[in-house]
Image: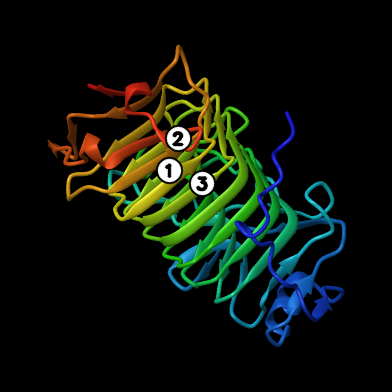
Amino acid sequence: MPLPTPVPGQCATGTVGRTVPADDGFRRAVANAGRRVVRLPARTIAFDDFTPANGTLDGGVVLASARGIVGAGVGRTVFEVAPGTSTRAGDIPTGFPNTNQLSVLKVDGDRTVLRGFAVQGTDQGHLYNGLRVDHGSGLRASQIRVAAIPGDAASPPGETFGINDYRTAGSQWSDVVVDGAGVGASGFGVNNSTDITICSTLSKQNRYGMGFAFWQSSGVRCIDCRAIGNGRAGFNFERVTGSNELVRPVAIGNAYGVRISNDLGTGTFRIVDPPLTDGHFVVTLPYRYNGRPNLQKASGITLIVGGKPRPDLLRIERY
């Protein structure tokens, strides 16, 4: 099934402007970009090992010196860590809530444009993350595929992410695929971010975790997003506050479709025109979260079908 086309004006792809070719090597081109977008050729860019970068360990890093990267297409420009080159297994923490800080590619900076490339998992003998967008505001990311990023749990440190949108504001993503390929933990993660819009995005086959995992964020909007065949929830919200919206969400073959947990307060969730199962749309509210009562109110969840509120078609399930 092809991904839907984003509704005009809801998810912008970002203006590229002047570009600089990466003919002299990826790291050098990014460092010398002068706030231009780096234009990448059709090839695999393979990093040897994960190297320290401002508190994380990454294969490649795009900092504020470049205004982004634009590849030749998702099947043509590919980032990976060369198989078997990691020496950083000892840097992976053990025990909750410590998180894995290794990523194939990290991007930092304001008003960054990302487009037309893939991030591919390889065998390193340990777990790591895929694409991490770290801080920054006004991101415009589109036409990206992330595949086979290894994880083994639905919580840290085994919960890794194919994509991790971390502490951003105003990010917009569109036409994205995160394919866990049966080895992924959680596909698309949003952590401590605000005002994020995700359009026409598929997260599938993340065996151990969620399709979309939102944590301690607010102002989430998903439009025409699909979560298929993930081990836990398709759309999972934890400590998510403010006004949030799911427009035409599809969740198939997950342990739960939409699950909301909040031990600190409550958010509002507007669900618009989803497919119904047996004439209903199900939202799961656990009784407890983090060992404390789940404070998310069922009254904060609204189902809209055909432009009208339909509380009769909304089913709240608890466990």
On screen, residue 3 versus residue 43, left or right, reads: left
Question: Mark 3 or mark 1, which is nearer the start of the sequence?
Answer: 1
Which of discs 1 and 3 lies nearer the camera? The answer is 3
Contact (Cβ within 8 Å) of mark 1 with mark 3: no
Mark 1 closeness class: few <14, some 14–19, many ≥20 residues within 10 Å: many
Q: Which mark is residue 227?
A: none
Instruction: Determine whether the residue tagged by mark 1 lies in a helix, strand or loop.
Output: strand
**Residue type, label 3:** Cys
Q: Is residue 205 visible?
A: yes
Residue labelled with disc 2: 210
What distance separates the C-alpha of mark 1 from that of mark 3?
A: 12 Å
Mark 3 closeness class: few <14, some 14–19, many ≥20 residues within 10 Å: many
Q: Is residue 85 visible?
A: no
Residue at x 75% of width, y 70% of height: 26
Q: Which mark is residue 222?
A: 3
Provide residue 74's location: percent of width, then percent of height.
78, 49
Mark 2 closeness class: few <14, some 14–19, many ≥20 residues within 10 Å: many
Q: Quadrant of the N terminus?
A: top right
What distance separates the C-alpha of mark 2 from that of mark 1?
A: 6 Å
Residue labelled with disc 1: 213
Instruction: Determine whether the residue tagged by mark 3 lies in a helix, strand or loop.
Output: strand
**Residue type, label 1:** Ala
Provide residue 267's location: percent of width, then percent of height.
27, 48
Provide residue 264's location: percent of width, then percent of height.
17, 50
Instruction: Determine whether the residue tagged by mark 2 lies in a helix, strand or loop.
Output: loop
What is the quadrant of residue 317 in the picture? top left
Given residues 220 and 206, the one toward you in this image is: 220
